[in-house]
Image: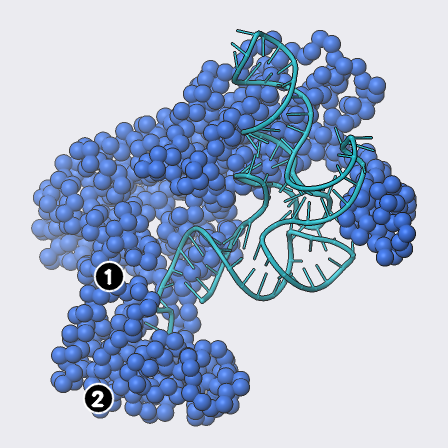
RNA sequence: GCCGAAGUGGCGGAAUGGCAGACGCGGCGGUCUCAAAAACCGUUGGAGAUCAUACUCCAUGUGGGUUCGACUCCCACCUUCGGCACCA
């Protein structure tokens, strides 16, 4: 008997050997084609949990598979280390964020290593270290130089718990809460740094160059929120003023019976008549207070106040009242609308409430001229619309837009929901924004050669709502790089998503100090061929990094359009109770516990076996034992001696052919499953294969060449998923080190071909019998055999055979009446 | 409301036009053992019938349809999950 499978002994042993031999460290110096495989870097939150394993272990298996297929695969790992959670955790523990974060990096790196992944640790990056954030600052300067970064006073979302502003993307849910701490945000007007993501809105909608999941594409498309319409000016009656409005329905313009301004609109006070002033100002005050808390209530009455002024419909000269109402938002379009109650639900409600006329201008097909019960928003025929009457509304859309353009009333315009990216944070733990404000020179970028602008270690970083760096005099007061006079530094830090927008570039040449990355290395490795990670970043990191790439292309730093060519989103691993893992529920699974018992290979394989990777699913402690049992059986089968008395076979050659066929069929199945990220069915196929081999081991087939081929194929196919046990067994069967430097086995269609196939016999589509035929048996023969089968006979008897259909190699269906 | 994904045994899931339930968990029966655990072997969707594992019927969220044949394709709906949402 061989010794037992003891993962605790073999796993650390091989990990040390691989590291010592540097078998996973890659360079450009290779004849093989490159493949950049990237998995999202972890945030330095403390412990590595099973979710990290779920994200990384299957990624590692896939990266290893690609490597075995003959690619020069880079698979790097690093740490996203700046940002609120680390800072908050450090404050809670009363230690410095740098200390806390670097402790976590240390700890998490150690935990990551127990996974046995083929990470190239020489390439590790940590975003909070000066040799990294120096280049984050450098990118900021480049964006600034190219007009893509600007400072503006804007109404921003502010998290009162985190004491900082947030980007629009970091505000979630119905109650508009902070993505990190779930506290509802408040509005503030602040001078903030923004990146011109909206410049790229259209390009970001184009996914034709990348193979990304439909889900992510839909979410980004939705987020960008492109809509085509017309912007035109509404002249104010008895005034030289006019109000720009945006509409996606120019075809309804003749139906306008009022206009509405958002409460915050700049013309509100100008247009309000003295008599209406008191009511309007009161409403505005109430509305701004309301908008924070109650705006989500969909049942809310649509309310507003009349300004006392009138606007003129530029198409027909009709005079309509101008209202102020909070159902119009300042943040979208022009902050003012034309009210067309007959063809917009909100305008309809509003008109009903204030007794405004609701004239129909687009007639439904069978309209009898009566007033509408509800807004009609479908296409129809134009009525009451002057020269456009009688046209289908879809046609009138363009005709009216053309007319407006020709008569300089307005012009076609595209509107987006997406905003520019707000990157200022009033917190300590981030990369300082490399800008100096000088009384003489104004806003001055820090010269590149002065980077990094170091984050002072001795700042008082407790959050107050203002930037902690503002209170660090040594940091704040400086001299102007341009005139040498007294100046102040920008004291806000950058959103941590800035750091993660370019980390994949840094991996290509981590020590490089002439730029963010060595252009030669960058040119070799980028773009990323395969990216994997969670869906939660669909409209954050994944949108930002695409924007960043396009901006870098325009600046001349990169020469491609998309950072990651292929994306795969894994699902979420749930607790044993089918609920999201959380400390409060007490359903958190700690991978360390399992590594010490069943071993890393079992954890890896179990995570892949649970179900489709993109779907996630509940952890099951019995399930992992099943997978561990499988590895035990593989161990026993491969490592243990052959039985002394093998069962003799009647036809040894046949048994050998059968074994080869199973082997090649399995290679085919496993290869295709790995290509498609179907780890669960891949492992099921390997289990089935192993079960077959366990049985075959009792027989003389073990003395044929097919047997050792089968054992080798089994280990090679299992190697990406379970790197330790396969390395150990590979050595024990006397093969040269390392299994991870071997090529992936190829399947031979000839060997995989069935000698006999089972054809299903159906009568009227129901399975009644099975027959065995040769794969290329002629159709007539198969049909006859099917008709003769006892199962078919039973159901044909006394009936008439109308038709016999043969789906080659699969089924014969006999249709009877 | 709009966009996206999903609904299959006791459980995780497999099969994407051709044997529904691969593989695994759990259950049941057995071998080994003083006994238990582990390991191994057998069995396991439901109902009926049978000496029988011959056989018959039912079954993939619901209702229709296409097809010789539908978990799979089409139409309508229900439910769940995720995203967006007073976006003009």
Viewer-side residue, A439 vs A346? A346
Name which residue lies at 27% across and 29% down. A103
Disc 1: CA contacts within 10 A as few (<14), some (14-19) or many (>=20): some
Q: In which quarter of the image is the N terminus of chain A?
A: top right
**Chain containing mark 2:** A
> Which quadrant of the view contains residue A453?
top left
> Mark 1 = which residue?
A293
Q: Chain B is drawn in which colour?
A: cyan
Residue A239, which numbered label?
Answer: 2
- Dot 1 falls on a residue whose secondary structure is helix
Dot 1 or dot 2, earlier in sequence: 2
**Secondary structure of the residue carrying numbered label 2:** loop
Task: Say which of A671 and B88 sits in front.
Answer: B88
Q: Where is residue A411 in the image (x, y as percent from the top left)?
A: 38, 79
Q: Position of residue A247 (x, y in %)?
A: 38, 76
User: Which quarter shows the C terminus of chain A?
Assistant: bottom right
Q: Answer yes or no: do the residues labelled 1 and 2 have beta carbons within 8 Å?
A: no
**Residue at 9% over, 50% down:** A486
Q: Which residue is found at the position 55% from the left and 23% from the top?
A: A629
| Most foreground residue, A410 or A483 | A410
Instruction: Tell which of A219 and A359 is nearer to you.
Output: A359
Specify the colour of chain A: blue
Left or right side of A775 for A355: left
| Picture residue at 35% right of the left edge, 34% below the top | A586
Would you place residue A111 above or below residue A239 in this image?
above
Q: Is residue A240 left or right of residue A630?
A: left
Mark in the foreground, 1 or 2: 1
Residue A765, percent across and down?
77, 51
Q: In which quarter of the image is residue B49?
A: top right
């Amino acid at each position: 008997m061989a010794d037992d499978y003891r993962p605790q002994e073999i796993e650390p042993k091989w990990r040390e050997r691989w590291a010592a031999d540097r078998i996973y460290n890659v360079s450009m110096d290779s004849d093989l084609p490159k493949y950049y495989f990237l998995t999202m870097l972890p945030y330095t939150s403390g412990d590595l949990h099973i979710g990290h394993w779920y994200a990384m272990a299957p990624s590692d298996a896939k990266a290893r598979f690609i490597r075995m297929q003959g690619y020069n695969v880079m698979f790097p790992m690093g740490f996203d280390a700046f940002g609120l959670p680390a800072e908050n955790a450090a404050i809670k523990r009363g230690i410095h964020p740098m200390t806390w974060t670097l402790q976590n990096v240390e700890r998490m790196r150690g935990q990551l290593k127990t996974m046995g992944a083929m990470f190239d640790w020489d390439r590790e990056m940590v975003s909070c270290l000066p040799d990294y954030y120096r280049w984050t600052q450098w990118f900021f300067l480049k964006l600034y130089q190219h007009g893509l970064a600007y400072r503006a006073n804007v109404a921003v979302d502010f998290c009162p718990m985190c004491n900082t502003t947030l980007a629009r993307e970091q505000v979630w849910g119905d109650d508009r809460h902070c993505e990190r701490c779930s506290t509802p945000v408040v509005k503030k007007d602040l001078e903030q740094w923004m990146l011109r993501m909206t410049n790229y809105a259209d390009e970001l909608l184009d996914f034709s160059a990348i193979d990304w999941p439909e889900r992510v594409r839909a979410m980004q498309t939705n987020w960008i929120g492109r809509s085509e319409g017309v912007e035109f000016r509404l002249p104010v009656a008895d005034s030289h003023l006019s109000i720009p409005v945006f509409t996606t329905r120019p075809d309804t313009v003749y139906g306008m019976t009022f206009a509405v301004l958002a409460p915050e609109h700049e013309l509100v006070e100008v247009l309000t008549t003295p008599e209406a002033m008191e009511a309007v100002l009161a409403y505005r005050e109430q509305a701004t207070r309301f908008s924070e808390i109650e705006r989500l209530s969909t049942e809310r009455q649509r309310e507003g106040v009349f300004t006392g002024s009138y606007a003129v419909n530029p198409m027909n000269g009709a005079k309509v009242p101008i209202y102020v109402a909070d159902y119009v938002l300042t943040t979208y379009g022009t902050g003012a609308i034309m009210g067309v109650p007959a063809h917009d639900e909100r305008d309809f409600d509003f008109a009903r409430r204030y007794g405004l006329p609701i004239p129909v201008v687009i007639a439904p097909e069978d309209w009898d001229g009566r007033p509408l019960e509800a807004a009609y928003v479908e296409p129809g025929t134009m009525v009451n619309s002057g020269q456009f009457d009688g046209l289908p509304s879809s046609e009138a859309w363009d005709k009216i837009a053309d007319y407006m353009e020709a008569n300089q009333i307005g012009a076609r315009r595209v509107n987006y929901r997406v905003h520019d990216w707000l990157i200022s944070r009033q917190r300590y733990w981030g990369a300082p924004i490399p800008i100096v404000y000088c009384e003489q020179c104004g806003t001055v970028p820090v010269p590149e050669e002065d980077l990094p602008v170091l984050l002072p270690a001795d700042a008082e970083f407790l959050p107050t709502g203002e930037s902690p760096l503002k209170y660090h005099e040594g940091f704040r007061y400086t001299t102007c790089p341009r005139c040498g006079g007294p100046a102040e530094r920008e004291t806000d830090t950058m959103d941590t998503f800035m750091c993660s927008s370019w980390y994949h570039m840094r991996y290509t040449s981590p020590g490089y100090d002439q730029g963010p990355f060595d252009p030669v290395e960058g040119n070799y490795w980028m773009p990323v061929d395969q990216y994997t990670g969670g869906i939660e970043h669909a409209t954050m990191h994944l949108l930002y990094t695409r924007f960043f790439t396009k901006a870098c292309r325009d600046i001349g730093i990169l020469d491609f359009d998309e950072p990651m060519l292929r994306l795969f989103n894994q699902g979420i691993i749930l607790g044993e109770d089918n609920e999201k893992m959380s400390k409060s529920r007490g359903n958190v699974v700690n991978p360390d516990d399992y590594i010490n018992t069943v071993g890393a290979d079992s954890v890896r394989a179990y995570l892949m076996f649970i179900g489709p990777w993109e779907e996630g699913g509940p952890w099951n402690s019995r399930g992992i034992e099943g997978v561990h049992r499988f590895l035990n059986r593989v161990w026993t089968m491969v490592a243990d001696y052959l039985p002394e008395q093998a069962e003799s076979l009647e036809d040894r050659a046949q048994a050998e052919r059968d074994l080869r066929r199973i082997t090649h069929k399995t290679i085919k199945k496993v290869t295709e499953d790995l290509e498609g990220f179907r780890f669960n069915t891949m492992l099921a196929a390997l289990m089935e294969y192993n079960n077959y081999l366990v049985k075959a081991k009792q027989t003389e087939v073990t003395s044929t060449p097919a047997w050792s081929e089968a054992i080798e194929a089994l280990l090679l196919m299992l190697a990406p998923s379970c790197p330790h046990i396969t390395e150990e067994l590979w050595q024990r069967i006397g093969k040269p080190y390392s299994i991870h430097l071997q090529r992936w086995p190829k399947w031979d269609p000839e060997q995989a071909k069935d000698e006999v196939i089972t054809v299903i016999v159906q009568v009227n589509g129901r399975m009644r019998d099975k027959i065995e035929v040769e794969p290329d048996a002629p159709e007539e023969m198969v049909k006859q055999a099917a008709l003769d089968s006892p199962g078919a006979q039973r159901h044909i008897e006394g009936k008439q055979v109308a038709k016999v259909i043969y789906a080659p190699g699969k089924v014969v269906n006999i249709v009877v009446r």
